[in-house]
Every structure is written in structure tokens, then in C-alpha cells.
Amino acid sequence: MPAEPTARYLDNHATTRTDPRVVESMLPFFSERFGNAASTGHAFGDDAAAAVETARAEVAELLGAEPVEVIFTSGATEANNLALKGVLGTSPTNAHLVVSTVEHPSILDPAARLQRDGCQLTRIPCDADGRIDPETVISALTPDTVLVSVMWANNEVGTINPVIDCAQACHDRGVIFHTDAVQAAGRVPVNCRNLAVDLLSLSAHKIYGPKGIGALIVRRGTRRIRLAPQIEGGGHEGHLRSGTLPVPLVIGFGTACRLAREALESESNRLSGLAGTLVEGIRSRLPGVRINGHATDRLPGNVHLGFEGVDGDALLAGLRQIAVSSGSACTTANPEPSHVLAAMGVPEALSRASLRFGLGRFNTEEDIAVAVEEVVTTVERLRGVDNSPRPTVR
Ligand SMILES: Cc1ncc(COP(=O)(O)O)c(C=O)c1O
């Protein structure tokens, strides 16, 4: 059912509104600057190629990477597939892969596919906050392990992982390390310059850029990572990802990365403040509200709450003035409770009665006030709390 047109958008982990400055930067590349970035040797192609390289440098700059390490893809789903299938595609058939249980389906599904095709797979557990302990990573490694993939920040509960330590532990043992940094890049500092991260995925539409463009960062540090390309034909992107580059999207991605870098600190402080107001506002008026995810090591704009004693579907359906996500990740196609909350040990009923709020650049204090009021009154109504004015007893 479409949300009310006036609904406040609080689902910025799912996607973000494209920043008007990003749209502005893209527009000329749909019209007068329409060249193919691979058709150099004339002004149109040269212009597109130069603009693409400027954007590539902006993406690299956000992450402390080198421009040559940025491989443009159609988004993070493709980048994650390229990382996993690319590394395993250049490894022995029965090589060992380690992923965490709380990864996005764009990691879990290719990992399951690779397992069906003969690779060994270990899914490592998280703790009650959804965090992956580097010791758990280390204990999962075997002499056959070629790749470990642990996300930088979780897309449901916002927990930030000790990726630096996980990566170092893998490097010390000669294992390639990949991180899905989709929710972290552009929201919290992600700098791979001095990190043992070999491969990193990100996506433009989570940071106020356009949908349909992302990147896999393939580090060229101490050792060369060999990847089997998943899309061939033309040799674009250093033969790792063929296909004509969507120049307007690439330009928008570059602008989004620059804006995110420039605003990183102020934006993350502002969003932490709004998140605090939201949590306080709801918990000061409602009992039985549990915070899911890590108390402090979490994405600044993420609030994930479980409401005891209410039906999750009825809760979501009752919220007409705000657009948020169900904690159960429940869709008609997938009525399963969230695999992330299950891995954290959250009871199924509470998982189904959880909400994910994703605050972003365009949210205001007024949005938060509306959200608090809407959530409190809806939960009270569902819990059967009568708040109607009582007749005065004389
Ligand atoms: C953690 C994480 N990884 C990967 C993806 C997939 O990104 P894309 O939409 O660019 O394919 C998402 C999107 O929801 C995500 O949150």
C-alpha cells in the first residue's frame, strides 16, 4: 500500500532521496555531454572519460583508496557477487569461504551458491548486539580458507563491526578480506589507506546518489588480488567488469561521495542527535521498548526498536504518517522473521514487533516529533491503553 504522500521518510537504510546537487551534476551527461567513456579519440568520448575519472577519484577519496582501485558496478549486490565469486573463481574448487550470519542476502545467497558448486562454507555467529568478534573469525579459519567477508555495519540494527581487527587477523594468516561497507561508507569514517581490507563494496543510492551504480574497491596493496570477472565483453574496468559505463550515474556517484565526505562529521553528529531524541521520546512515554543492536558502536542514523506486546504487522500498518521498515523484514514473498535478529537471539515475537528507523540528510526535528507521536499513540492503541480524557470525579 503506498504511504500517505505526506509521510515522513525514515527508511534511509533502504534507500535515500537523490540529493538535488547530485541530480544537477548528472543532467548534462544525459544531454549535451552524452559521449561513451570508452570511445575516446574524439571530443565526446574524451569529455565523458575525463568526467568519469574525476568521479572515480571522488569515490576513491571518500574511502582512502586509489582511483585505479575503484571498479564501477551496477550496485553493491553486483560488487558483493564479484568479490565472492571472483575470488572463489580463481581458487581451488573446494576452497573455504567464511561469511557472517548477519550479512545482507547479496553475500549470503552467492555464498550458498558457491557452496552448492563445491566450496566449503562457514557462517560465523554474531553476539547479542549483532557484532562479529575477530576471535570468532580467527577460529573459523582453516588452511583452505581463501576469503572472509564481514560487513562494516549492519543494515538492520546498525551495529558497526571491528572490521579493522577482523581484516588484520585475516591478513596475518594470508587470507583475503572483503567487507560490505554499503551502510557505513559515507556515513562513518571508512578509510582503507592503512587497513588490511582487500575488497570493499559500496553503493551510491545509500548516500544520496542515484540507484544502479556502486563499486567494488580492489586494493592493490601488498599483494595482487586475482578476481574472475563475472561479466565479460569489452574489457572495461580493467577487464573486471565489462559493459559501457552509465556515465550520468557514475558522475552522480562521484558527486554523492564528495558531498558525503565534506559533510561526514557534521551530518553524523546531527543524525546521532536526532536518533537520541527519537529513542528518548519513545522510551520516556512507552514501557516495554527494547533497543536492538549495539548501544554505542552503531550507525548514527539507525534506531531499531522492539515493542513488547504488539503485533508487528498491525504496528507497521498503523503507522500512516511515517515510512519505516519492519524489523521482521517481512514481505509477502518472504514472511520469515529477520535472520539478523534471529542470529542475535531476539525472540521471534519481539523480532516481528520491531521497527527499523533510518534517519538521513533530509530529516528534520519535526519529522522526529511526528514519529514519536505516531509510534507512541499506535503502540498504546494496539496495547489497549486508553488515553481518552477521563471524566472528572466530583
Ligand atoms: C548491507 C547491504 N549490502 C548490499 C546491499 C545491496 O545494495 P544495492 O542495492 O546497491 O545492490 C544493501 C542494500 O540494501 C545493503 O544494505
Image (cartoon, grey):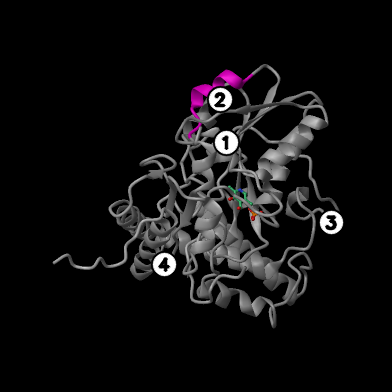
Question: Mark 4 vs mark 3: which is more N-terminal?
Answer: 3
The amino acid at mark 1 is: Val
Which residue is label 1 attached to? 150
- Horizontal side of 252 relative to 157 (left or right) equals right
Front residue of this view, candidates 349 and 82: 349
Pick out the residue farthest to the front. Answer: 394
Q: Residues within 10 Å of mark 2 (few under 14, many from 20)?
A: many
Q: Which residue is mark 3?
A: 234
Find out if the beta carbon at label 3 lies less than 8 Å from the nearest ligand 1 atom: no
Image location (x, y in percent) of residue 34: 72, 77
Residue 91 locus on image (x, y percent):
77, 29
Q: Residue at x 59, y 60 (%)?
A: 204
Which of labels 1 and 4 is toward the front?
4
Label pair 3/1, CB-CB below 8 angstroms: no
Considering only order in the chain, which callout, 4 or 1, is on the residue closer to the N terminus?
1
Q: Residues within 10 Å of mark 1 (few under 14, many from 20)?
A: many
Q: Please identify, in this view, whether the residue under mark 3 or under mark 1 is nearer the observer.
A: 1
Q: Position of residue 303 (x, y in %)?
A: 42, 51
- Ranked by sequence position, the earlier of labels 4 and 2 is 2
